[in-house]
Every structure is written in C-alpha cells, then in structure tokens.
Amino acid sequence: MEEEKGNGYTEDGTVDLKGNPVLRSKRGGWTACFFVVVYEVFERMAYYGISTNLFIYLTKKLHQDTVQSANNVTNWVGTIWMTPVLGAYIADALLGRYWTFLVACGIYFSGMSLLTLSVSINPLKPGPCSDPSGLSCKKPTTLQLGVFFGALYTLALGTGGTKPNISTIGADQFDEFEPREKAQKLSFFNWWMFSIFFGTLFANTVLVYIQDNVGWTLGYGLPTIGLAISILIFLAGTPFYRHKLPAGSPFTRMARVIVAALRNWSLPVPTDPKELFELDLEVYAMKGKYRIDSTPTLRFVLS
C-alpha cells in the first residue's frame, strides 16, 4: 500500500476494467467526469422530453380521459423512481456500476426507440380525429396500447439501472484520500446539477414546443437521438474511468447490523464510543474504506 501511494496510485480501492490499480494521472479526475456530465445533459433531455408532455399525448392522441391519463402518468413515474432500487442492488452486489449502467442503457434505448415507433408508424398509433373532445374518436387498439405502454415501462426499467449509477460513477473518479481530488468532487456535483437543469430546461421548452406544434414523431425522435448520443459519449470516456469492484449487497449488511443489534439488546453500552465494536484499522487501509466514528447523538434509543 505504501508503495502504491508513493507511485501515485489511487487509495480508495478504484481499479481499471481489468481489476488493476490505477494511477491518478492516467484515469479519473475531470477528464473522465467531462464525459459523465455531458452524458447527463443529453439523458435528462431524453427523459424529460418524454415525461413532460406525456399527459397531453395520452389525452389528445390515445383519447383517454383526464383521470385515466393522470393515473397512467403517476403509475409510470412511480415505477421510474422504484426501479433504481433494483439497479443499485445489481450494481453493488453483482455486476458493478459500469456494466450495470451499460446494460441498463441498452434497455433504456430500446424503450425509447419503441416509443418513437409507436407514435410514428400508422399500425402502431391511433388514427387522426377531428373531435377536440375525443368522445367520438376511435379508441386505440389493444396492440397500440400494448406497444406504447410496453415501451414506457421498458424505458422505466432501463432508467432503474442508469439513475443510481451514473452519479456514483462520476464520484468514483475522485479519490477521497487525496485532498485536492476530495475538493474537486464537491465541484463535480455542482456541475452535475447544472447538467441536469440544462437538459431539463431544453426538454421543457424546445422539445415540448416541437411536440405541440410540429409533431410527435420529431418530438419523440429527438430525445431518442439524444439518448443515443449520450450513450456514445459515455462509451468514449471508457479508457479514462476508474471503477470500484462490487462490494456485496448493502441489504445483507444492513440485515446483519439489525440482527446483531437485536442479539445484543440487553448488553451494557460502554460510556466511551471508541469501545464499541469496530474492524481493525488494517482493514480500512487495505480496502480503502472509511471508519465512521460513533457518536452519542442517538444514545437515548438505548436507554
């Protein structure tokens, strides 16, 4: 470990794709994060290009009433925010963040492509209707609804693997054990949030205007192209990324803590927090992990 520190290797456990230690000067830092930040601009544009005007499409093109449309939108958005739990688990316990992210990108892009086709090809989209209320319009067929909502939920499954991993991939590019890079990580998250807002702004203005005034084919096609560009940008940065190996399921570790707490419920609590159980200091040095010191803040729950 001391030899690696002297040679400029990262100390936080990051490696390359082959599992070898990496030099700070060769991988990570702002060079790698440039690809991550630019990816997020296009990805946010793609996601909000679909979600922002989804209610309008359901009411005007699929001729659903407002209650049904609102229910479908909220169900889909709820799924969008639940699937990251699965994506984070797979990344932490099985594949790692990079490979989980790439697999999810393929699913995400498949959903976006199918969604674009469902609003573009005549057999997959409802026919035109001149009735503004939609009451006399012909309802979409089972095939049309199946393709459209199947694409939406395929997209939702894909975002479950991208949302929880892309920001942590960016954070992995900075070594917390190196003071300069630790400070740069804070700046990275500032740019990260800026990229989210910039992509969202473009989607909520330009793309919504196109969907309302030009057409849904172009309005959905542009976000799909944007997502393809974002994936290519991310892949272009592969030679510069640092990676952290899967560390096992966090749910397993949480369960072990709960079980241990229940087993030791009746044991006396030491007055000095440093006397509580901890791993040997060598473990943290070897694996690049942090030791979080105990505090008496929540001690009242043990009394």
Image: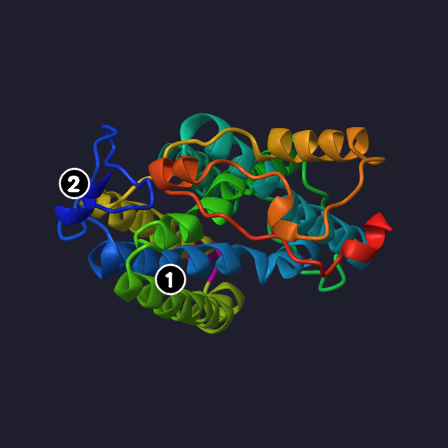
Q: Is residue 67 above or below residue 120?
A: below
Q: How crowded is mark 1: few (under 14 residues within 10 Å), some or many (20 or more)?
A: many
From the viewer's perspective, is 198 left or right of 2?
Answer: right
From the viewer's perspective, is 269 left or right of 102?
Answer: right
Q: Position of residue 190 (x, y in %)?
A: 41, 71
The foreground one among 270 and 44 is 270
Q: Where is residue 45 in the image (x, y as percent from the top left)?
A: 43, 61
Residue 244 visible somewhere in the drawing: no
The amino acid at mark 2 is Glu
> Which quadrant would the N terminus be assigned to in this image?
top left
Residue at screen point 65% across, 57% down:
295
The amino acid at mark 1 is Val
Corner quadrant of residue 253: top right
Magenta part of the protein: which range? 215-219
The CA distance from mark 1 to mark 2 is 39 Å
Residue at screen point 65% across, 51% down:
273
Q: Which numbered disc covers residue 3?
A: 2
Local secondary structure at mark 1? helix
**In this view, which residue lies farthest toward the top?**
94
Residue at screen point 26% across, 46% down:
232
Q: Is residue 220 magenta?
A: no
From the viewer's perspective, is 126 left or right of 103?
Answer: right
Local secondary structure at mark 2? helix
Q: Position of residue 229 (x, y in %)?
A: 29, 51
Residue position marked by numbered label 1 in the rendering: 41
